[in-house]
Amino acid sequence: MMSWSRPLLFSLLFYFTELILAQIKYSTPEEVKLGAVIGNVAKDLGLDVSTLINRRFRIVSGAQDSLFEVNPNNGVLYVNKNLDREQMCDRNVACLIDVKVVVENPLEIHYVAVEITDANDHAPTFAEKEKVLEIAENTSPGARFQLPGARDPDVGINSVQRYKLSQNDHFHLEIRDRGEDKIPFLVLQRSVDREQKTNHSLILTAIDGGTPLKSANLNLTINVLDINDNRPTFSKEVYSVILQENVALETVVIKVQATDLDEGTNGDVEYAFGGDINSKVLELFSLDTNTGEIRVNGQIDYETADVFKLDVQASDRGQPPMTTDCRVIIKIKDVNDNEPEIEVTSISNMVPEDSKHGTVISLISITDLDSGLNGKVICSLTGNVPFELKPSFKENMYSLVTKETLDRETVSHYDILITATDYGEPQLSTLKTLSIQVSDVNDNIPEFSHSPLELYLTENNAPGASIFSVSAFDKDLYDNAVVSYRIIRGGGGHNDMASFININSENGDILALKSFDFETLKTFQFQVVASDSGTPSLSSNVTVNVFILDQNDNAPVILYPVSSNGSAEGVEEIPRNVNAGHLVTKVRAYDADIGYNGWLLFSLQQVTDHSLFGLDRYTGQIRTLRSFTETDE
C-alpha cells in the first residue's frame, strides 16, 4: 500500500478542489427520445470554443452515468438511455441525477445535476377493479365510508388531482387531503332501503391533472344489509277456494303465500293457523309450515259444514319476529252423496172404500241433505193404483190422495211403492212401501147362488123336519156380511103355503110344519128374504119353487061295471061264435100315484080255464084265446 506524506495529501486536496470549478443544473422531461440534447456543458461553463480543440469532455463512470453521454469534442450532453422518472427516483422528491463531467487539458471536474421532470405518462390506477361495501339499511344519513385511493406514479399536476362519483340519489363524494394524498370518502346523504334496492352500483373516477387528462375507474358495489324492518305480506288478504266434499285425504286445497322483503332469517317465512281456530277444523285441514299448503286431513262433508273460515298467520324468523294474517275461506261444493229420505205421516192406514176422490190418505215429506239440484227431489208412485200424489205449496211435501173409486171387494189391500229421486248427477233414489187397507162399507146386498131356487120334496115328509137350506153370500165384511133370513108370508089363508114353512134366521134351514101329499098338492112357492146386519141393512129376495115328489103310497083301483045285485064282480056276455083274439073287454084301473108309481101291470089271479082267455098285462085287454066249443060254459 502506497503511503502518502501529510504535506502531499494537502497538496492534492488543494489541487482537486481547484479542479471542481462549477456545478451545472439541467432539466429534462422523462421519456424523451434517445440522443435528445440536454445542454451544452462547454458553453454553460463559459469555455471559449476556440480553446476546445485540445480539450476533451468525458463523463466519469458511475451507476447512472450511462443514462447520459457527452460529446467529447464540444461538451454537448445528450440522453443515452430511456429516462423513466418513476423507476429512477422517489416520487416524493425531486429527481436529480448527478453527472460528473471531466474536462481535460487542464483537468477539470464539473458536477452536472440533471433534473428529470415528470411527464404525464401514467394514468391513475386503483389497486382493485371493484370495491364492495356493506351498509346496514338503518344507517343514518351523514355516515362516511373511506374508499381506496387511486395510485399515480406521476407527480405534481400529473398525479391524481380529483375524484368524481357517478350520478346517484343516495351518496355523494367527500375528498380529504392527507399530505400530498387525496382520500375519497363515500358519504350517505339519503337512507337506503334494502327492500327497494338491495345494492347500488357506482363508479368512482380518479382524474390526474396532466395534459391530456388521464383517469381510472373503480366499480363500487354497495350492498345494503338487511334488518328485520318488514312484515311478511300475503299475496291476498282473503283467499277463497271451492272444495268438493268427499275429496281424498292429502288433497291440496290451496297454497297461501307470504313474502318478506327482508333477507336471510329476517325474510324466511313460516306459516301457522291462528290461535283461535276451532279444534274440529284442525282435524279436517293441515297446514305445511314451510310451503303454506293447506291439505285435507279428514272427511269433508258438505252436510256437516258448507264453509270454513281459517285464519293463517305468517311469521318471519327475525328477532323479534314480525307477523301478519290472512283469511282463507273454503267453500264446500256439494256432491250428490245423500239419498232422499221419505217420511210418511199416515192419517189412517184404513181407507173406507166409499172415500170420495181427493180424500187425503197420508202426508209425505221428502228430505235430501244435499243442496241445489242434488237436494231437489221428485216423488212418484209406481204401478197402477187408485192413488196419486198431490204436491204441497211447500217444496218436497206431498199428499197421497184417492183418484179413483175404491172397492174393497175387488182389492182390499194396496202396497203403494213411493219413489223419491233427486236431480243430482248421478241420480239417487229411495223406495218406500206404504201399506193401505181398504175398510169395508155396507155396499153389497146378500146374494143367493141361484134365483129362483127349486126344492124337490118327497111327499109324506115328517112334519118339523128340515126340508131345505138356503144360503146367501155377502161380499162385505164383519157385520155388513152377517146375513139373517126370513120368509115373506101372505095373509095366512088356506092357500098360503108359506104359513106351513118356517126358516132358521141364522143358517137358512127351512122346516115344513106339515106333511105334504103329492096327490093333494104338487107344487107351490114362497119367498125368502136375506138381510145383512149393516147400517143401513141391505137385503135381497129369492123365490123358492117347491115341487112335491110322488111316493108309491096309493094302491091301484080297478074300474069295472058293477052288477045289478051290487056285486063288485063284472059280468060280460060273449057270443059263442067269436074267434080267437076276440076282445072280450078291457079292464080299467086307476092309481093316484104318478110315474112309475102310477104305471099299472095287469094279471089274472083266478081263471077257470086258462086256455080260453088271455089278459094283456100292459093294456088290460082280455081276449079269447080260441073259439068256444059246445062244452064251454
Image: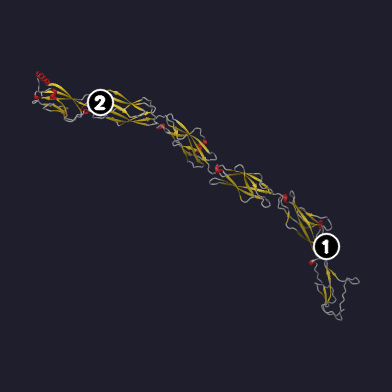
Residue 81, disc: none
Q: How many neighbours does mark 2 have within 10 angstroms: few (below 14), some (14-19), or many (20 or more)?
A: some
**Residue 63 showing in the rendered view:** no
Q: How is the image coloured?
A: secondary structure
Of tags 2 and 1, the one toward the viewer is: 2
Q: Does residue 623 appear left or right of residue 117 in this picture? A: right
Type of amino acid under label 2: Ile
State the SS at label 2.
helix
Q: Which mark is residue 520?
A: 1
Residue 464 left/right relative to 415: right
- Residues 257 and 572: in front is 257
Say which residue label 2 marks. 157
Q: Which amino acid is tagged 1? A: Thr
- Tell which of 401 and 457 is nearer to you: 401
Return the x and y of residue 377 as percentages of the image width and height: 58, 45
Q: Quadrant of the C terminus?
A: bottom right
Left or right of residue 332: residue 153: left
Q: Earlier in the sequence, mark 2 or mark 1?
A: 2
- Residue 534 placed where, x, y %? 74, 49
Residue 539 against residue 156 in the figure, above or below: below
Q: Which residue sits at x=12%, y=28%?
A: 71
Task: Write down the quadrant of residue 363 in the picture.
Answer: top right
Q: CA distance from mark 2 to mark 1?
A: 184 Å
